[in-house]
């Protein structure tokens, strides 16, 4: 058949040629898809790889010894950080307590009790010293801070005269368990004991909330087996209590210029130190300071504070 004859045939069979071309092009497309599919990885393998990576990251994070202030948190930890900020910034603690106790998932019940305790602490130092010695600038700053807290506390003790009174309201109204509160309110309205001390501290550390950890430490410090012994249970208990106060303020970062040292300055007139650790250490007899130092070091380790941290390094 000549070229001319072929052209005549194609012209006479246009629809057949178009059909053949469609079939050929379709086959070529299917071949291309098959080749691409051959090189694709199964979707399940990708998901499994991502899960393994996440698991490995979680394991690495858990292996690190992090201080409570830098622990990796859950959503609840983020919420407690927000609640803590509200607590510190509240200008009316009575109003704060009323609304916070209804938010147990955010640690609100715990912070309501903490606000009450802060107001009650003012009663320990009722009135101000007639004269002050030491740092005059610090004395003026301390007086301003305590005056501000007194204003924030207006109506709190009148509404809830005791910790038990507030605790009863907190636990019976607007239900829900607050994971920051210790079991049965130990250390706040119920006594602590040697049998529960370690567990309560562990529970507080697991929350990732450093104020909860500091509260648990102060309430249970006397029962911790850390540091050397003075050879007398009573002396050891007192030294442990003092050491707990030192490490607790380090945990929350308010040793210098905080409420405790400001209260001490205003009430006693001793304003020589603006760091609570210096005030506490001055109470320790010189004969027991080496033992006291071992207790402080043991508590720092127990609470996950790095020995060279910015707070720990200034303790002595």
Image (cartoon, helix red, strand yellow):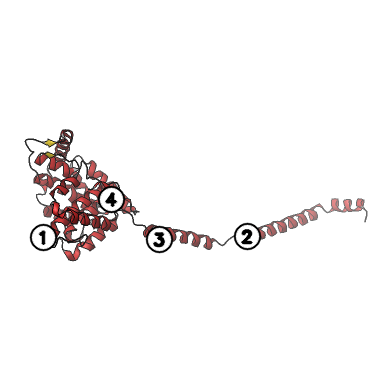
Which mark is first along the chain, 4 or 2?
A: 2
Q: Is residue 175 above or below residue 141?
A: below
Gap between marks 3 and 4 measured at Cα: 24 Å
Gap between marks 1 and 4 measured at Cα: 36 Å
The kind of secondary structure element at disc 4 is helix
Which mark is first along the chain, 2 or 1?
A: 2
Residue occupied by mark 2: 39
State the residue in front, 268 or 104.
Answer: 268
Q: Nearer the viewer, mark 3 or mark 4?
A: 3
Q: Is residue 138 left or right of residue 60?
A: left
Determine the residue located farthest toward the front in the rendered image: 287
Residue occupied by mark 4: 80
Q: Nearer the viewer, mark 3 or mark 1?
A: 1
Q: Position of residue 183 (x, y in %)?
A: 20, 61
Residue count near mark 1 (Cα–Cα under 10 Å), binned few <14, some 14–19, many ≥20: few
Whether label 1 touches label 2, CB < 8 Å: no
**Residue at point 18%, 66% (across, down):** 195
Res 40 visible: yes
Which mark is first along the chain, 1 or 3?
A: 3
Q: Nearer the viewer, mark 1 or mark 2?
A: 1
Which mark is first along the chain, 2 or 3?
A: 2
**Residue at point 11%, 60% (across, down):** 234
Determine the residue located farthest toward the bottom in the rendered image: 195
Residue occupied by mark 3: 59
Which quadrant of the structure image shows residue 265? Answer: top left
Residue count near mark 3 (Cα–Cα under 10 Å), binned few <14, some 14–19, many ≥20: few
Gap between marks 3 and 1 measured at Cα: 42 Å
Q: Position of residue 105 (x, y in %)?
A: 27, 54
Which mark is first along the chain, 4 or 3?
A: 3
Residue occupied by mark 1: 234
């Amino acid at each position: 058949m000549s070229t001319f004859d072929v052209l005549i045939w194609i012209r006479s069979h246009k629809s057949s040629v178009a059909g053949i071309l469609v079939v050929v092009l379709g086959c070529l497309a299917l071949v291309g898809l098959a080749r691409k599919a051959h090189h694709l990885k199964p979707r399940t393998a990708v998901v499994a790889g991502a899960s393994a990576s996440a698991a490995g990251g979680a394991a690495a994070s858990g292996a690190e010894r992090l201080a409570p202030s830098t622990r990796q948190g859950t959503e609840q930890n983020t919420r407690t950080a927000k609640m803590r900020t509200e607590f510190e910034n509240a200008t009316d603690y009575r109003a704060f307590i009323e609304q916070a106790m209804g938010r147990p998932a955010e640690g609100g019940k715990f912070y309501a009790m903490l606000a009450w305790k802060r107001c009650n602490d003012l009663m320990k130092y009722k009135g101000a010293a007639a004269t002050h010695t030491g740092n005059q600038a610090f004395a003026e700053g301390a007086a301003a801070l305590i005056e501000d807290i007194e204003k924030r506390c207006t109506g709190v003790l009148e509404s809830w005269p005791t910790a038990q009174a507030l605790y009863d309201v907190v636990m019976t109204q607007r239900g829900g368990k607050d994971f920051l509160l210790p079991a049965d309110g130990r250390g706040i309205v119920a006594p602590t004991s040697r049998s529960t001390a370690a567990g309560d501290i562990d529970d507080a550390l697991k929350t990732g909330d450093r104020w909860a950890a500091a509260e648990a430490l102060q309430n249970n410090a006397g029962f911790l087996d850390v540091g050397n012994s003075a050879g007398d249970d009573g002396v050891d208990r007192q030294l442990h209590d003092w050491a707990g106060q030192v490490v607790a303020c380090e945990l929350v970062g308010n040793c210098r210029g905080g409420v405790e040292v400001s209260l001490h300055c205003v009430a006693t007139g001793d304003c020589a130190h603006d760091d609570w650790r210096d005030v506490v250490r001055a109470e320790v007899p010189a004969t027991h300071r080496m033992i006291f130092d071992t207790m402080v070091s043991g508590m720092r380790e127990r609470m996950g504070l790095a020995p060279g941290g910015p707070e720990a390094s200034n303790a002595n």
